[in-house]
Image (cartoon, rainbow, N blue to C red):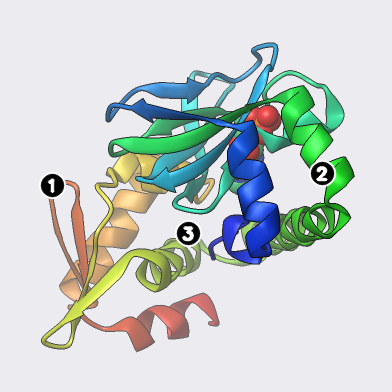
Amino acid sequence: MTADFWAGLEPAAREALRKRGQSCTYARGRELLHEGQVPDRVLLLRSGLVKVSRVVLGGREVVLAYRGPGELVGEQSALDGEPRSATVAAVEAVDAFVFTHSAFRGFLREHPEAALVLLALMSQRLREADSRRAEFSTLSTMGRVASRLAELCDRFGDEHDGRIRISLPITQDELAGSTGASIESVGRALQTMRSLKYIETKRREIQVLDREALDALRNA
Ligand SMILES: Nc1ncnc2c1ncn2[C@@H]1O[C@@H]2COP(=O)(O)O[C@H]2[C@H]1O
């Protein structure tokens, strides 16, 4: 699901926000924000895609989300003043508006309707986190992998000749990191899905051949 802050703003609010920011570009692979760092800015993505992740005990990367055009990153620290909750890195070249905390907070004070948009997005994220927590305690690894692939299809899928190509260069490690399962068990789940002809995989590419089968697995 996208959390498009920009789309939720009225034209006047967009203009007011744009005036407070500076344009910035980030090459693919570059970190925009780093977990634990003392925060100083908020970014509104204009184009490109970023990966939001955390490093957990044992050094493993857990992917929390992907964010794209119209979405904010760094807003949590601007709201609560705490260090960065996650690392945000460019999966592809990114164009963004960058705001200081005081500029962003000043904007929210002057545009309460924008603050409501942000609250709605934070509420949506809480719902997603709750769903994932429930999923982690009820679904098998196969169900969780199917659920994540179905989400990726909905957000990044390009449909062609009855198959859906997920246009996101995701590795098996990253997929495992977003399901809370080990790389080995995610590898086994993918192998089973391949042999059932639900999916086809290449290096950093997944194609879904049977989208309905994924839904059946996630609801099993
Ligand atoms: N679960 C999540 N889903 C989407 N974005 C997130 C999630 N957790 C953290 N982020 C983003 O990653 C940013 C890291 O810096 P902040 O904590 O300032 O703000 C955070 C959010 O913008």
Report if residue 77 is visible in the image: no
* Mark 1 nearby-residue class (10 Å; few <14, some 14–19, many ≥20): few
Front position in the image: 168 or 6 = 6
Amino acid type, residue under disc 3 in the picture: Thr
Residue at disc 3, secondary structure: helix
The alpha-carbon separation of the residues under discs 1 and 2 comes to 43 Å
Q: Position of residue 102 (x, y in %)?
A: 78, 24
* Residue 72 lies in quadrant: top right
Find disc 1 in the rendering and name its residue. 203
Residue drawn at 28 percent across, 39 percent down: 92
First reached walking from the N terminus: tag 3 or tag 1: 3
**Label 1 lies in ligand 1 vicinity (Cβ under 8 Å):** no
Q: Is 78 rendered above or below residue 165? A: above
Residue 123 falls left or right of residue 53: right
**Circle nearer the N terminus (1, 2):** 2
Going from N to C along the chain, the mark reached first, 3 or 2, is 2
Label 3 sits on residue: 141
Structural crowding at the residue carrying mark 2, measured as other residues with C-alpha within 10 Å and reported as few (<14), some (14–19) or many (≥20): some
The spot of residue 59 in percent (x, y) is 49, 19
Which one is in front in this view, the residue at disc 3 or the one at disc 1?
Answer: 1
Occupied quadrant, residue 206: bottom left
**Residue placed under numbered mark 2 in the picture:** 108
Q: CA distance from mark 3 to mark 2?
A: 41 Å
Q: Quadrant of ligand 1?
A: top right
Query: Which residue is painted at 42% across and 61% down in the image?
Result: 145
| x 58%, y 64%: residue | 7
